[in-house]
Image: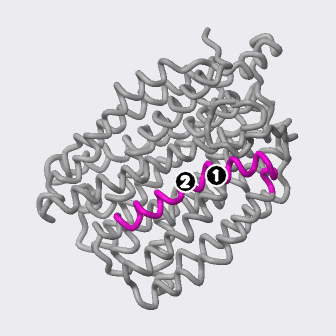
Amino acid sequence: MQTSNTGASRTRQVVAAVIGNALEWYDFIVYGFLASIIARQFFPSDDEYASLLMALATFGVGFFMRPVGGVLLGMYSDRKGRKAAMQMIIRLMTLSIAMIAFAPDYLAIGMAAPMLIVVARMLQGFATGGEYASATAFLVESAPAHRKGLYGSWQLVGQCLAVFSGAAMVALVTHLCTPQALDSWGWRIPFVLGLLIGPVGLWIRRHMAEPEEFLAARRQAKGQAPSLWQVLREHRRSLLVSMGLACGATVSFYVVLVNMPTFAHKNLGLPLDQVLLVQMLAVGLMTVVIPLSGALSDRLGRRPVLMAFTLAFFVMVYPLYVWVAAAPSLERLLVMQLLLCTAIGGFFGPAPTALAEQFPVEVRSTGVSVAYNVAVMVFGGFAPLIVTWLSKALGTPVAPAFYVLFACLLTLLGTYCLKEAPRTLKPAALNLGVKP
């Protein structure tokens, strides 16, 4: 089995994880951006609002499978290796993408159409449930001791690249296609292109090497991986702290990044293609902030960086929603998204490594999978549905801010209670390169 310790090999490890992660999340994100169109094609109703709720509920259905996939794939990763798990995840995701890309609509096959979408979303949720923990463990364990925050941050850079490319592709087809063409066949184009995840993702991940840190831990354990029950019994505090950390991250991700284009278009009346361009700019900025804050956490520690950016986000989110809702415009939306995405990026940078450091190597993938996916299922999966319902029920476009504020409070509590790993400082600790 291959191992890697050299700077050049570590660079390849990071590239493999980031590109594979970005390709995988791309199609997951595109569904959220195209929810209103998918609603009309697969969940027809006389009430457009009811159709949208059904499509968003289907987006959330996949999250019921995330803890299942997270546990099974996390245990598989701890027993068989990070590389084996990440290759399996790519295969499962490719199948689910193909099901959505080529599914006949409701007019063609009736109730079988939404059932296909539900099954595809469940399979997608199962695969994605194992991705975060496996990729995070892989990156952190591949890192030199003084750069674990930086290396872990690249996991979320991959997700940002997925949001950016997903927004770019949806903006392109929305701009080039007429409304009729977009509803008929144009919406499928981003999904079809996403099928590149198969050959490209598999090729990239086939060339990854298992981290030496993982192999050493497995040798010490003599190949005996702990059971799920043992993880739940012996690491209860770590699980609870990690759930708190993940709560605000997942809610902000799905409310501010994934659901915002649909929200701005439906609730604020802004043109979808231009809203997506705003989103691309904001996500581009966030992609730069993430590794910077990850590197900063290697010098200052995870807790102070996480706490500072979470507090900044908490203070800004409600006033910004009120400001944009008072006079909706692309300019105000851009300012809002740039500020919020800067704060989110600052939190995202240290977050993966902070989660990984709550668990020993031999149970890391399982522990992170359980904590992260339970938090995502409970708080993130139905976030688009919840904020859409809140906006309707409360009659105010600032309703999403209330849900985000609640999630931030839980994250502040988790951040306060997290376990700080010992830091190893080197002269180049803030260098953004990945070589030692």
Q: Nearer the viewer, residue 333 or 300?
A: 300
Q: Main secondary structure of the magenta part?
A: helix
Q: Residue furthest bottom?
A: 326
Looking at the image, residue 411 sits to the left or right of residue 249; the answer is right
Q: Residue at x 60, y 42 (%)?
A: 67
Q: Residue at x 37, y 83 (%)?
A: 329
Residues at circles 1 and 2 in contact by the CB criterion of under 8 Å: yes
Across and down, in percent, residue 130 comes to 57, 35
Across and down, in percent, residue 41 comes to 22, 57
| Magenta residues (range) | 277-303
Q: What crowding class fits label 2: few (fewer than 14 Cα within 10 Å), some (14-19), or many (20 or more)?
A: some
Up/down of 212 relative to 375, above or below: above
Looking at the image, residue 387 sits to the left or right of residue 211; the answer is left
Question: The C terminus lies in which quarter of the figure?
Answer: top right
Q: Which mark is residue 292?
A: 1
Q: Residue at x 84, y 37 (%)?
A: 424
Q: What crowding class fits label 1: few (fewer than 14 Cα within 10 Å), some (14-19), or many (20 or more)?
A: many
Q: Secondary structure at mark 2?
A: helix
Q: Nearer the viewer, residue 308 or 62?
A: 308
Residue on which the image places disc 2: 288
Across and down, in percent, residue 117 comes to 33, 46
Q: Which mark is residue 235?
A: none
| Residue type, mark 1 in image | Leu
Q: Secondary structure at mark 1?
A: helix
| Residue type, mark 2 in image | Val
Question: The N terminus lies in which quarter of the figure?
Answer: top right
